[in-house]
Image (cartoon, rainbow, N blue to C red):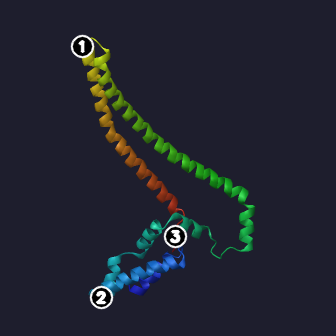
Amino acid sequence: MGKNEFIRQLDRMLSQLPDVERKKHTDYYGELIDDMVEAGMSEAEAVAKLGDPRTIADDILTETPLPLLVKTKVRPSGGWTALTIILAILSFPIWFPIFIALFAVLISVFAVLWSIVIAFVAVVVSLIVSGIAILIAAPITVSVPAVTLIMAGAAFMMIGVGILLCFGVYWACVGVVGLIKLIAKCIKSLFIRKEV
């Protein structure tokens, strides 16, 4: 495949983007090919090194901000005509509550995920703080040395379990952030048009 064919395919696959954005990306890849050709590669080798235009277009659309994708996805292909505006207004009682319900479900999913992490953090902090409090208070409040030693042992166990659970809390945070990124990527993919 030559440079012109590569750029033409990339441009077609990025047709969802505004003209300025699309031109920015096609110019960038055109310059990359030109630079590789100047460095001694053939045009076909340079295009092969860049990879498949479909993969590049998917990466570009994935990195495009969601508001821009939503704006271009919502815009009718023929532009906003009087009929489409009237239909959008008349169907407002149907699509708006559905949109609000989906948004509320999404927000509640995020709230539940983060509340699980906050609960884990609260357990860890309470174990460590309780263990330290018992270590400080046991010698002062208990007069029997054997009971003081038992309480100190329990306090050290609580602190140890709390420290061990810190690793679990860290991985829970990493998992929640990864899950949120995955959900955001799935939502974003709904607004990416697949060009043939």
Q: Which residue is mark 3?
A: 194
Percent coordinates x, y for residue 107 in the rendering: 55, 49
Earlier-in-chain disc, 3 versus 1? 1
Residue 27, picture quadrant: bottom left
How far is the residue under mark 3 from the one under mark 1? 74 Å
Amino acid at pointer 3: Lys
Query: Can residue 12 be seen from the camera position used here?
Result: no
How far is the residue under mark 2 from the one under mark 1? 84 Å
Residue 46, picture quadrant: bottom left
In the rendered image, the vertical position of residue 78 relative to residue 93, given as above or below: below
In the rendered image, the vertical position of residue 183 relative to residue 50, given as above or below: above
Label 2 SS:
helix
Earlier-in-chain disc, 2 versus 3? 2
Residue 117 falls left or right of residue 155: right
Percent coordinates x, y for residue 49 in the rendering: 32, 78
Circles 2 and 3, Cβ within 8 Å, touching? The answer is no
Label 3 SS:
loop
Amino acid at pointer 1: Pro
Query: Can residue 183 be seen from the camera position used here?
Result: yes
Q: Which residue is mark 2?
A: 38
Q: Which class describes the residues within 10 Å of circle 1: few (<14), some (14-19), or many (20+)?
A: few
Q: Which mark is residue 145?
A: 1
Residue at horizontal 40%, vertical 38%?
121
- From the image, which quarter does the N terminus lie in? bottom left
Residue 122, picture quadrant: top left
Circles 3 and 1, Cβ within 8 Å, touching? The answer is no
Amino acid at pointer 2: Glu
